[in-house]
Amino acid sequence: METKLLSNSTADLQEAAHLLKEGNVVGIPTETVYGLAADARNPEAVRQIFAAKGRPADNPLIVHIAKLEELESVAVSVPELALKLAEKFWPGPLTMILPKHPSIPTITSGGLDTVGVRMPSHLVARKLIELSGVPIAAPSANISGYPSPTTAQHVMRDMHGKIAAVVDGGDCCVGVESTVIALEGEDSVRILRPGYVTKEMLETVVPHVTLDKAILHQLQEGQTVRSPGMKYQHYSPHAHVTLIEGRWPEFAAWVQQHAEVGTYALVFDGEGADLSVPYLTYGTGDAEQAHQVFAKLRELDDIGAKRVFVRAPNPNGIGLAVYNRLIRAAGFEVIQV
Ligand code: TXA
Ligand code: MG
């Protein structure tokens, strides 16, 4: 299959919406990362998403809507708290797990009776949902296990020949995936995957916000998991990644001691000049690091890195999302210096 690269012109968006309506898979931009989109209600279209990504069938997809009225056709009941959260954070990078409506097939929900729903803020994503007239199932548009794509070129690299088209909407501004939450009663939510919407932001609406243990800790054999995505190897480039925690002088000394041919460092902006190994930087501050982290992991593969020592981000605010992605990219190999 030839994968068409479409622009965000009106004619191209109409073509992409037509492809979606007809049951095809299309790579689309969102404010977080690019998504691999298909009609959430069409089991055959959704099957093609799983096939293109090589995604395990028990890992559910997020369903994207453009208007609040569409929520009741995706979720069978919507608690008051969900409406409060939607009012504050939608459109935007927040996914809520809600009881699934029967119109959403179980292939979309990975066999669960719940469904993850979000209303993206990216104008191209919203336009495509409106023009196609269907709710859009979309996981991140990477090969399963690889870092998520934040440009149309990243999607082309992973999906060329496997899907009908990719819509180029430019660089994703957030850079890490949405915050995924489960509602627990009327005054409490649990964060299953951290993202741009932080615990502190959620606390302005909900009295009790807890962080799921799987965010920072590796699951032990046989442990049940609230969000199936948490149990798989994730976000990993081909290079062997190690996350290093500690202050700069100790980091630099450790890297110097352990570097071999093909070793690179991934450090903060402004650092690295005194390192003896080649390095890339991924910004300073949590929002900037979120914006850059996946693109830099991909770039390290492109330049032939075999081993990467990553300077651990501060795990606060949006930094928790960056830390969560990097700890998985490293297969939980973390070293304190
Ligand atoms: O920002 C995002 O959320 C992006 C863009 C494209 O919208 N999408 C995305 O989808 O990151 P994906 O499939 O890569 O990650 C979805 C995560 C997975 O960890 C999955 O297990 C979890 O959400 N999830 C989805 N539905 C769920 C459900 N019903 N119950 C528990 N976890 C769910
Ligand atoms: Mg993903």
Image (spheres, grey):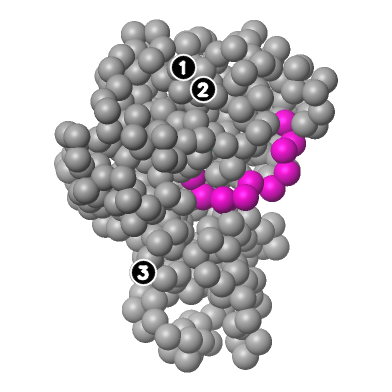
Under circle 1, the secondary element is helix
Is residue 274 placed above or below 64 in the rendered structure? Answer: below
Is residue 49 placed above or below 251 in the rendered structure? Answer: above
**Location of residue 169 (image quadrant):** top right
Q: Residue 70 carries which label?
A: 1
Q: Residues within 10 Å of mark 1 (few under 14, many from 20)?
A: some
Q: Distance between the residues labelled 3 and 2?
A: 42 Å
Is residue 182 placed above or below 309 in the rendered structure? Answer: above
Q: Residues within 10 Å of mark 3 (few under 14, many from 20)?
A: some
Residue holding disc 3: 334
Residue holding disc 2: 67
Under circle 3, the secondary element is strand
Type of amino acid under label 1: Glu
The stretch of residues the image draws in magenta is 167-177
Task: Tell me, yes or no, whether the two marked residues, 1 and 2, touch with CB atoms within 8 Å.
Answer: yes
Under circle 2, the secondary element is loop
